[in-house]
Image (cartoon, rainbow, N blue to C red):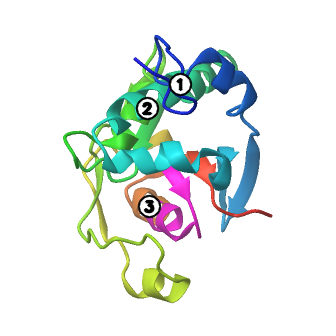
Amino acid sequence: MRCYSCAKLSWRIVCDDCQKSLFAPTVRTRQVGTLDVISFYRYTTLEPLLLSKHKPEGYRIYRHLGKMLFHPFMKEYIEHDEGTVYVIGVDEHVKSGYSHVACLTHAMKMRGVKIQHASLMARNRVNYAGKPLQFRLQNPRDFCYTGQKRLNAILVDDIMTTGITLQEAQKVLTQHGVNVLFALTLADVSEV
């Protein structure tokens, strides 16, 4: 197999050299309303990999990113937390044969962590890519939550642009008694 980034022969979808040099995470936290959102990258750094979600190889790339970033983050987080932490993916809708958000949440599975797969699904599947804020506000996701109630959870999504989707998800979860601790995303579009 070849590295998706540099095309060198590699056992992994992203070779060790690219992981260390091109894709070294720059973790940052951005507050959106009352929600803290932790992102591992700026969108521009990871754009070619993130856009792979619309292609068959995206499954391998998102699984690799989940193992490389979300798993170690969760492992460290769980060491400092007592009790069970739940993980809820934002709209784990299956497209192109897999759910890219589910690849990320699955990587977080370990002792003390329970994944609530496909429990927060959008009824409105409108595409937000490249749309202005006004369009997003006029076309909410209309989430439906079917998971457990009265629990502490971490919200997971792949990309944060305006934060509208995460705020809407947090609102729906709060209505069902879910305390959203914070959100995790691969990338933040904001360059601030």
Name the quarter where the C terminus is drawn.
bottom right
The question of residue 115 being in magenta is answered with no
Q: Are marks 3 and 1 in contact (CB under 8 Å)?
A: no
Q: CA distance from mark 3 to mark 1?
A: 31 Å
Instruction: Give 78 or 5, whichever is nearer the viewer.
Output: 5
Q: Is residue 122 above or below residue 22?
A: below
Q: Is residue 122 visible?
A: yes
Q: Is residue 159 above or below residue 79?
A: below
Under mark 2, the amino acid is: Ile
* Badge nearest the viewer, 2 or 1: 1
Taking the spot 52% from the left edge, 71% from the top edge, the residue there is 164
Query: In the rendered view, does 32 fall on the left or right side of 172?
Result: right
Looking at the picture, how far across and down is residue 23, in whole percent?
67, 33
| Residue to which mark 3 is pinned | 169
Query: In the rendered view, does 158 fall on the left or right side of 147?
Result: right
Q: Mark 3 or mark 1: which comes first in sequence?
A: 1
Looking at the picture, how far across and down is residue 95, in whole percent?
23, 49
Q: Is residue 81 visible?
A: no
| Residue to which mark 1 is pinned | 14
Q: CA distance from mark 2 to mark 3?
A: 25 Å
Name of the residue lying farthest toward the left = 97
| Residue to which mark 2 is pinned | 61
Looking at the picture, how far across and down is residue 24, in whole percent?
73, 31
Under mark 1, the amino acid is: Val
Label 2 secondary element: helix
Under mark 3, the amino acid is: Ala
The question of residue 160 being in magenta is answered with yes
Taking the spot 36% from the left edge, 82% from the top edge, the residue there is 139
* Badge nearest the viewer, 3 or 1: 1
